[in-house]
Amino acid sequence: MAAELQVHVVPHTHWDREWYLPFAVYRRRLVALLDSLLLALPREPGLRFHLDGQMAVVDDYLEARPDRLRALRRAAAEGRVSLGPWYTLPDEHLVSGELLLRNLELGLERARQVGEPMLIGYLPDQFGHTAQMPQLLRLRGIDTAVVWRGVPAAGLGGVFRWEALDGSAVDTIHLQHGYGHGRRLPLGAAELGERLSEETWAPVGPWLVMAGDDHLPVPSGLDAALGNAELPRATAISNLADFAAHRPAAEGCVRGELHSAASSFVLKGTLSSRFPLKLQHAAVERLLERHLEPIWTLSARPWPEPELRYIWRQLFLNSAHDTICGCSLDQVHEEAGRRLDRAARAAGSLVRRLGVDEVAETFFNPSSFERLGIAPLGTGRPDLVEARAVDPPAGLLFEDQGDRGDLYTFEPEGEPVRAPATGLVAERLGEEPLIRLQLDLHNQRPDHRLRLLFPTAARDGAWAGVAFGAVRRPYRAPGTERGQEYDLRTDPAREWVLAGGLGVILPGPFEYELLEDGHLAVTLLRCVGRISRGDLRNRPGNAGPELATPAAQMLGDHHFELAVLPAAADHLEVARWADVFCHPLAPAPAGLAAPPQLSGRPTEMVSALRRVRGRAQLRTYDLASFKIEERWLD
Ligand SMILES: [Zn+2]
């Protein structure tokens, strides 16, 4: 029957675990939803339910209802609920590449403990998509993706080929009208037929109708209603895997990131909302990925699997798009801060278990190239270097502008005010070309955006670090980018950006913009007081509820560390110095194993060195071929 099915109706719910309500409230609703689903399945023989592509909702449910595991297993075995592939639905610009992969690994692993995972890269609500995502999916055996936001309008069709930076590709189903277009289908035959004809607009099928939306319950009675209605096309409840198996052929092809507002909101203001929380998150990622796991792998100690799982899980929960994006209630972000705190403490206690003390003499080099006389991924005593105070680079400015936007969208008010940047403390270490900067500032005002402006000779665009790679983005003049939102010239970077020969390095994800006069602007604080507003010029309509978020005004003290690489030769040089600045040599115990052999290519970067079921694994990526390489070391 599936082969003849023309309209695949996929009942589902989109489950933001925390957003404009805290986790505890949504969880109560989730438990009710899954209770009702498990009761409905025996009564409605055709019912199937798509569980939003994330296993965290299954864990949340089983924590409250451990006795329902068997019923859930049976439903999964019969193909009536989907499992995974993700653990949570992470924002793709604001977390590390390693976190994206680990999130997928845990989702697949948890799914396999309950049944068969859904091998579809379901990315329904993320605010745009990172350039290497197709390669990440391929690495874990997934050849199809489903996306909504960020797709450029240019005739890609309902299914397109999406290529990563290395050329590896996945067929991608574009939810052109979002994941909620088939929400609340009517059960009366005539209304149902009419509605289904509206929701299947493509000239050729098969067609996919996503029958659900944010936190909506199980559409009870839909199976019978579809059976009773006389519909012009063969229509039934289905699931994404069945639709993907019968999907129309791919039309267009696109390479790299999907971050266009042409057909959907991409909500770029989330790149800078509650920025300090994103920086804290990134600091825990770095500690885990580049210090704790590699050093532990090279030590003879048994792998601390339960502790590391606990730490990673805190990060996965925080990586969910409504959480790391900063666009939730203050209460949600307070809890996210506590999760980070717990993760950092747990990681700190593991570091102490390694036998590292404060006055260590041995240091670990987390990079793929020699640093201060220490071999790549090796340990030793670093060459002594002197830190000396220097003048900050000339011409740095603060730009302050009123922001009457919300947590999703910047909206300028009044003219930007520029002033010489004061309060920066600059130093250089030894012969390093980097100028290291520290900045302490006290924010006393609400409703504004503060940026640091670097003078550059940039006219044509910038290179920026992204998960497992780098992208070059062209300069876009004001007013040239029209779409569902307007004037979106800010972009995400990971750890570095290069424009006009100037490299700017900041440990974490950050937001930058190339200005008309050649300045490179880096957002330090964006201070707004509502989740969403319905009266913006830059975005038609709301992106969430109009709830107050006083803590998002970021009042109080803030500390930033960044670095400048003047006269950078190319993006490879900036990426390597960013690795030096963002991942300092780490105190390490003596007696670690010899470092693994690396390729020696100057373009190779380290992503992970860890143990998986007892075996050591090294993951690197290459800034020329953009290939991610995984290698077992024993
Ligand atoms: Zn969402």
Image: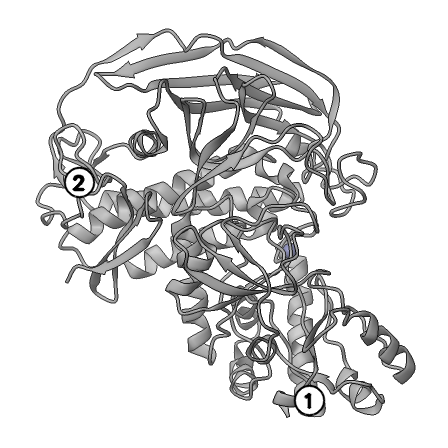
State the residue at coordinates (23%, 38%).
Answer: 602
Question: Looking at this view, is 601 or 103 the one in front?
Answer: 601
Dot label at residue 506 = none
Task: Give left or right: position of 109 versus 64.
Answer: left
Residue 381 lies, with reference to residue 77, above or below; the image says above
Task: Name the disc covering residue 376, or none.
Answer: 2
According to the image, what is the colour scheme of the structure? one colour
Amino acid type, callout 2? Pro
471 shown above or below 31: above
Residue 71 sits in quarter: bottom right
Residue ID at (17%, 34%): 370
Quarter placement of the C terminus: bottom left
Q: Secondary structure at mark 2?
A: loop
Quarter of image, ligand 1: bottom right
Q: Nearer the viewer, residue 115 or 356?
A: 115
Dot 1 corresponds to which residue? Answer: 46
- Which amino acid lies under the numbered mark 1 shown in the image of this protein? Gly
What secondary structure is marked by label 1? loop
Q: Position of residue 315 (x, y in %)?
A: 45, 50
Q: Toward the viewer: 413 or 601?
A: 601
